[in-house]
Amino acid sequence: MLALAVGLALLTTALGFQAVGGAAVARHRAGLAADLAALAGALHVAEGAVAACARARSVAAGNGAHLVDCVVTGDELTATVTVVPTGPAALVGSASARARAGPVSRRSPSPR
């Protein structure tokens, strides 16, 4: 009986660690997909918001994410994506991330 209780406790602990690990992996995947989607979309801003967001959506999907928001403001694009984790972490919900990309602005040189 004691062996069964210990085995059940170990199984529950292992499932908990798997859920936490799955959630962390999903969060990192969402961040990566948001970064790549924003960069890809920003390259197409000159073609219009529809083309830029279509490219961002395509890149997000290619990275296993779903583009939930795409905003073009001037030369910048902001992409928000979600990723559904696998395993027990999927019961908790999805991971989301937001990234912004656009042209690099020139700063005046700092005084020495």
Image: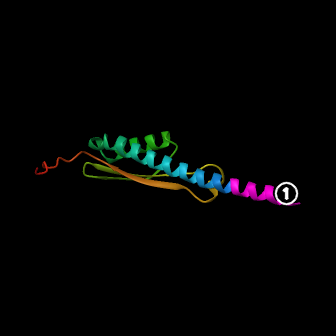
Q: Which residue lies furthest to the right in this view?
A: 1
Q: Foreground: 62 or 11?
A: 11
Which residues are drawn in magenta? 1-14
Q: Which residue is drawn at 49% across and 49% down?
A: 28
Left or right of residue 33: residue 107: left
Q: Which colour scheme is used?
A: rainbow
Q: Residue furthest left?
A: 111
Task: Return the x and y of residue 66 as percentages of the image width and height.
Answer: 49, 49
Q: Foreground: 100 or 26?
A: 26
Q: Residue at x 39, y 41 (%)?
A: 55
Up/down of 48 relative to 17, above or below: above
Task: Return the x and y of residue 111 as percentages of the image width and height.
Answer: 10, 51
Q: Which residue is drawn at 74% across and 55% down?
A: 10
Q: Which residue is drawn at 35% across and 43% down?
A: 39
**Residue 5 belongs to magenta span:** yes
Considering the whole magenta stretch, tell me its main secondary structure: helix
- Residue type at mark 1 is Leu
